[in-house]
Image (cartoon, rainbow, N blue to C red):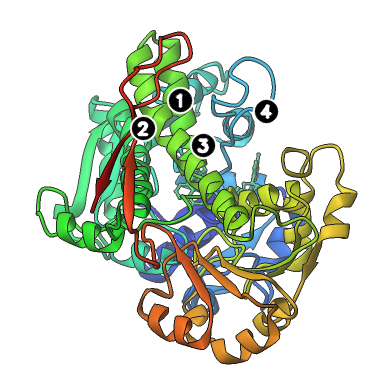
Amino acid sequence: MVQVKNICCIGAGYVGGPTCTVIAQMCPEVTVTVVDINEERIRAWNSDQLPIYEPGLQDVVDFCRGKNLFFSTNINEAIKKADIIFISVNTPTKTFGMGKGRAADLKYVEACARQIADVADGYKIVVEKSTVPVRAAEIIRRIFKTSTKPNLSFQVLSNPEFLAEGTAIENLKNPDRILIGGDETPAGQNAIAALSEVYEHWVPKSKIITTNTWSSELSKLAANAFLAQRISSINSISALCEVTGADVGEVAHAIGTDQRIGRPFLQASIGFGGSCFQKDILNLIYICETLSLHEVALYWQQVLDINEYQRRRFASRIVNCLFNTVADKKIALLGFAFKKDTGDTRESSSIYVCKYLMDEGAHLAVYDPKVKKEQIIRDLSHPAISGDNPERVSELVTITSEPYAACENTHALVICTEWDLFKDLDYERIYGKMLKPAFIFDGRRVLDNLHKRLQQIGFQVETIGKKVNPVSSLVYRAASKPACQEQDPTPAKKVKI
Ligand code: NAI
């Protein structure tokens, strides 16, 4: 079995950077080089201003960088020296051509495979760390097989990453499991053993799961689909809670104590974001469609539809509460990152809430503790968000460097990210700065324990999955049917609860 002395990671992003930093810390005798084509990113990794915010990351980087951890743009040199090469590049949803808006774009993975085939000599273990469609390893293997270099030999493994942004270092140091998929041949099993040994420096062997390549690739897509499905499931129940007087927090607690259901990921909100869930489910749907598994595709599509519904529903509720118009009204939006403890805004629900409010003509004052002003403007100016009128963003949006300034002269305060600091704001001070009636819309239920106090201050509080002002009566109407079917003539029943 190969003795691993050098690891190269292609892609210095949210996965490649933290993952290899932790490997370097846990394997001091292994030299780890993280490479990227993006010079600015590599410069940032070599500075005190790391390109991504992740709690605990700076300490680990400071501990290893320059000893056995290096960040470089010299990709060829790192490939040549490496025993193991991780491919951790982005695999975004395709924006053009066949599979547009659904399939994963594998051009960056393919470019890495071609570069490795061009540059490498001897025996290499190439590891898919990126999330890819099932059977993507076949593409990499075929590219290597076409190489005419007599002494190039390789094994391709799948080793998907399960870290969550915001808790990446903790997840990497104490993973629930490490998954390694590879060829069932002796050579494949040897490669699996070599990679497994790297992880065994700090992960108990019992947590290292080995499978065939395809099970490993598919497990990553399935894991993200299941996690997102839980969020959409509780969000669908939150809509029902808001009209019935049930409280989704209480429902989540009650059902989560059932061991068969479990507690995590039952937090109702304005929907999931981040670079992975939507992209990976779209990819799963695309795979199912291309394999004629239409019912399966439709099933997972619904998880995405509920997410979109939840964002829209929240924005509509803001408009409805503000007397059916937000045109020219000023609204403070707290939190722009897709979740707390990260500066990542990819697919953040905040972006969509901003879009719907901008579409209604609202003026927004946005504050986030970790997202840079330029990033917020860039996200909101994207054609999918601001249409063909990006100037609208500079007219309607201001970015503030602290939360109190955002609330100045606003009709409403909208919480879109669950940053802990939002629980400890001085809400009396905020109330004093706002126009009356002053509304709070809590899209993350971070103020759950403060509702009474906020109401005493004078706020009208609106939150996901709960009617803070009691529901007095409930109207059950005949369920609406698809337009092509005749309407059910049963009259609406009024039920007192
Ligand atoms: P990212 O966009 O932050 O980083 C990818 C990096 O790869 C970029 O810096 C880019 O410049 C670089 N790159 C692209 N092509 C390259 C090439 N040919 N040579 C050298 N560098 C190249 O992406 P992120 O978030 O790190 O994701 C990477 C993969 O990991 C994706 O497949 C993603 O689905 C998966 N993943 C992401 C997680 C997350 O929380 N962000 C969690 C688990 C998996």
Tag 1: Cα neighbours inside 10 Å, few (<14), some, or many (≥20)? Answer: some
Query: Which residue is under mark 3?
Result: 279
Cα–Cα span, label 1 and label 2: 8 Å
Tag 3: Cα neighbours inside 10 Å, few (<14), some, or many (≥20)? Answer: many
Name the residue rendered at 23%, 29% in the picture: 186
- Mark 1 and 2 residues: CB-CB less than 8 Å, in contact? yes
- Number of numbered markers: 4
Cα–Cα span, label 1 and label 3: 16 Å
Say left or right for 267 vs 358: left
Residue 191 place in picture, x, y as percent: 31, 38
Residue 43 place in picture, x, y as percent: 73, 65
First in residue order: circle 1 vs circle 2: 1
Question: The N terminus appears in which quarter of the rendering?
Answer: top left
Name the residue rendered at 33%, 67% in the picture: 173
Closer-to-camera residue (115/167)? 167
Tell me: residue 196, above or below residue 322: above
First in residue order: circle 4 vs circle 3: 4
First in residue order: circle 4 vs circle 2: 4
Query: Which residue is under mark 2?
Result: 217
Residue 308 place in picture, x, y as percent: 51, 40
Query: Which residue is under mark 1?
Result: 136
Residue 246 place in picture, x, y as percent: 27, 57
**Is the CB–ligand 1 distance for label 3 below 8 Å?**
yes
Cα–Cα span, label 2 and label 3: 15 Å
- Mark 4 and 3 residues: CB-CB less than 8 Å, in contact? no
Q: Residue type at mark 1? A: Ala
What element does badge 1 sit on? helix
Cα–Cα span, label 4 and label 3: 12 Å
